[in-house]
Image (cartoon, rainbow, N blue to C red):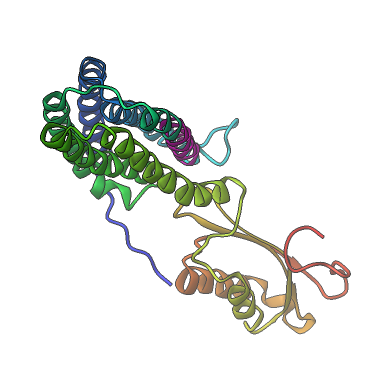
Amino acid sequence: MSHEHVHMPAKTKDKRVAIAIWANGVLTLAQIGGGIFSGSLALIADALHNFSDMASLVIAFAAQKIARRPADSKMTFGYGRIEVVAALINYTTLIIIGIYLIYEGGLRIIDPPQIKGWWVVWLGGIALAVDALTALLTYSMQKDSVNIRALFLHNLSDALASVAVVIGGALILLYDMRWVDPAITIGIAGYILYLGLTEIGGTIRTLMLGSPVDIDTDAVIRTLSNIEGVADLHHVHFWQMGEHDASLDAHVVIVESAWNQLESIKYRIKKTLDKEFNINHSTLEFEHPDHLHKDAQTYGHG
């Protein structure tokens, strides 16, 4: 199993995120003002979503900076996991905003207000352009980082929401279909909820030290157990500091006749982990069969 990632220079990432922050900030102010003036909840919904994007971008920008710090005496694993925490915050805001907009949209369907359609169309079109720009800025970076992926999904959902806002404004202008505005709001909110709920699970899994989703842990143990000189493995832990840094801790029981070959066996184990499973960090504790843990479980500490 192998993974290839094209890494973008840090300065380029920072510049792209900074541009996206300014663009979303200006757009949010314009949409909120326009939404209040025109009476469009869909426009305000899109503005709130854009505001959450701006906040998410600020969090991501700060997280990227912090994540580059080297490990120190207080954070011996380094600061890379801050990006996973940032992604959790961003997905949580998506879910909260989605629930709020469904509530507001439901109230407005019951009593649709007067709406100035042209304001909705023009501001929705401008929002679409900005959202598309932000999505393009973050697209090439999101393959490398769960933090930036959360941002990209924010921006993509914004772009789709802006399309819906423009269509809603046109229907209001042409047919005075005022109920379309809150209906679109609920549709946007439903999509926001879907994105947040489907993506947050992987982030929580990483923070909970869950095993990497793309690694068959049983297959790893079987493969290592078949290495010459290895009798058994137990107290095995699979985890990852970030989304691309799979790690393994394990107690390895060595057959008595191979006890004098520990360095050779350790080399073969580490080479196998790296080449076949893309696990390039492992901590191994070797046990002699006369002193092994009795009734030890394969996974965990039991």
What residue is shown at x 24% (from left), y 44% (from top)? 160
Please provide percent x and percent y for residue 126. 13, 30
Q: Is residue 169 above or below residue 245?
A: above
Q: Nearer the viewer, residue 108 or 230?
A: 108
Q: Is residue 18 left or right of residue 186?
A: left
Please name the predominant secondary structure of the magenta segment in the image: helix
Q: Nearer the viewer, residue 185 or 294?
A: 185
Whether residue 90 is in magenta: the answer is: yes
> Which quadrant does the N terminus fall into?
bottom left
Q: Is residue 18 above or below residue 187?
A: above
Please provide percent x and percent y for residue 21. 26, 27
Please provide percent x and percent y for residue 37. 21, 15
Give the number of marks: 0
Is residue 96 shown to the viewer in this render? yes
What residue is shown at x 17% (from left), y 28% (from top)? 120
Q: Is residue 17 left or right of residue 223?
A: left
| Among the 4 quarters of the image, the one containing residue 170 | top left
> Which quadrant does the C terminus fall into?
bottom right
Q: Is residue 201 left or right of residue 129?
A: right
Please provide percent x and percent y for residue 127. 18, 32
What residue is shown at x 31% (from left), y 57% (from top)? 5
Which span is picked out in magenta? 84-101
